[in-house]
Amino acid sequence: MKILMASSEAVPYAKTGGLADAVSALSLALAKLGHEVRIVIPRYYGIDRGKLTQLEGAMGVPTGAGEEWSAVYTTDLSGSPAKNPVRVYFIDHENFFGRDGIYGSPSEPDFLDNPRRFAFFSKAVFQLCRKLDWYPDILHAHDWPSALVPVYLKFAERQGGFAKGKSKGFSLTASVLTIHNLGYQGIYNKDNFNYTGLGWDVFYNAGFEDWNMMNLLKAGLYSADKLTTVSPNYAEETKLQAHGFRLDGVLRYRSADYSGILNGIDDGIWNPAKDTHIPKTYSAKEMEGKAKAKEALQKEFGLAPDPNVPLIGMVSRLVEQKGMGALFGPSYGSAWSICRDMNVQMVLLGAGESWCENEVMSLSSRLSNFKARIGYSEKISHLIEAGSDFFLMPSQYEPCGLNQMYSLAYGTLPIVRNTGGLADTVENFNEEKGTGTGFMFNDLNPQAIYNTVGWAVWAYYNRRPQIEAMRLAGMKQSFSWEKSAKKYVDIYEGLVKD
């Protein structure tokens, strides 16, 4: 099949979170299965045009405000199979994308013209296909920035088939929209709707209306032929009011076309047997390298070098969604109590809301067994996954989560809240049988986190053989993208046959 991924992010070109990793990894996995996959993203300021090839001729993109013009650049995605490379196309529009930031900047966290930026991008997806004379069987859009792609397909591009000469146009193209995080929907003033070039009948028929505003993701959910999200449990959670962010009714309405497919991980990068970021590689058959990584991690963060004390690691955005209020809230957070009451060490790498960054660094300066760094480092994140005994993820909600899967691959036991993809990937410790791959809690509050960390620490000191067996059980699991890609292929093939 011919598959076009439309996304606002893709590694290694533009990334703010897991969306970028998922789009590129899924594309590579599909290509390795023999499908013809292409990706289209905006050409942001930070993407060097000098490393890309420009397509000949400018491309006109019709909008409600007249025709916009853009250049198109291209390259092959690194890691592509030699005989079937994934081609990446970049829509270059200086006014919309020639600035710092993908969705916003420190001074303007959410660009005011985002609805126009991504309406232009979504329309440009179709013009790119015409320019290439390449019409996909599947248009796969990701999250709210490209949610207009299935809307345009249904209400404009597929109407009448646009069949010209030998080309079938988009008459047989089907659409899939994947939700990576339902909490971000692209809600803007509906005055921006005219720029889409769609009629106001579409505004109401496609479900844009949202309390007198315009909701891009909502319209995409009504318009796409199939809907997916990034874990089976999150698919069920988002159909409930508690986790549906006011779109649970839409997802219940579309439930027959909605499914959850667990993201995979890149086991070429996140693999302790191949990892170049850690002092010594290791595997389930030879674990010496994990002890070396723990020693290096303690040294890196200035902790007392002790192979026998349990070390808890975190790599996280410091935001409420990740449970940071319950963990680090200045008046009631559990991190202080954990480090005060338990014989443990904790390390954290992350960045986010200023209050949390300040509290984390305050704790780091006051506690000898808690150390943190603000920012992100690929090398240190790998060292934390390898060198920690436990990995803490107290998420308020987690559509899929990647770090708990990295942790399992590295023999690091996750301590997680029972939600979303965390529930799909971690098996809770069973004291009687000595089975499981991690430790889970239900309620997001400081006491629940404290108690569950205490449970894990107790098991470390008192049930060490069970801890070691759990490590090996986690390392033997497979979270490859190939499994996920085959499930997407099943959805694509169902649409093509229909």
Image: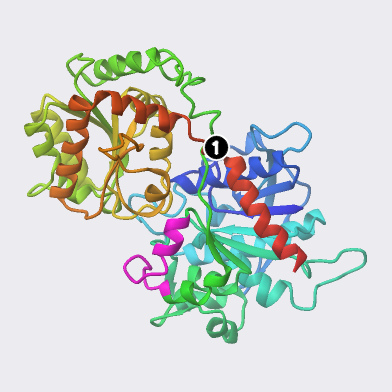
Looking at the image, which is closer to me, 255 or 168? 255
Above or below residue 147? Residue 486 is: above
Q: Is residue 410 left or right of residue 295?
A: right
SS category of the residue bearing label 1: loop
Residue where numbered disc 1 is placed = 12
Looking at the image, which is closer to me, 59 or 383? 383
Part of the protein shown in magenta: 232-248
Q: Is residue 258 left or right of residue 457?
A: right
Above or below residue 338? Residue 387 is: above
**Is-magenta flag for residue 44?**
no
- Which residue occupies the extreme right position in the image? 165
Asked which quadrant contains residue 368, the reply is top left
Q: Residue at x 24, y 21 (%)?
A: 301
Q: Residue at x 65, y 40 (%)?
A: 28
Q: Quadrant of the C terminus?
A: bottom right
Which amino acid type corresponds to the residue marked 1 in the rendered image? Pro
- Which residue occupies the extreme bottom position in the image? 201
Asked which quadrant contains residue 224, the reply is bottom right
Whether residue 442 is visible, yes or no, is yes
Q: Position of residue 41 (x, y in %)?
A: 60, 50
Q: Position of residue 417 (x, y in %)?
A: 29, 49
Q: Is residue 100 left or right of residue 465?
A: right
Q: Position of residue 131 (x, y in %)?
A: 78, 56
Q: Residue at x 43, y 63 (%)?
A: 236
Looking at the image, which is closer to me, 301 or 104? 301
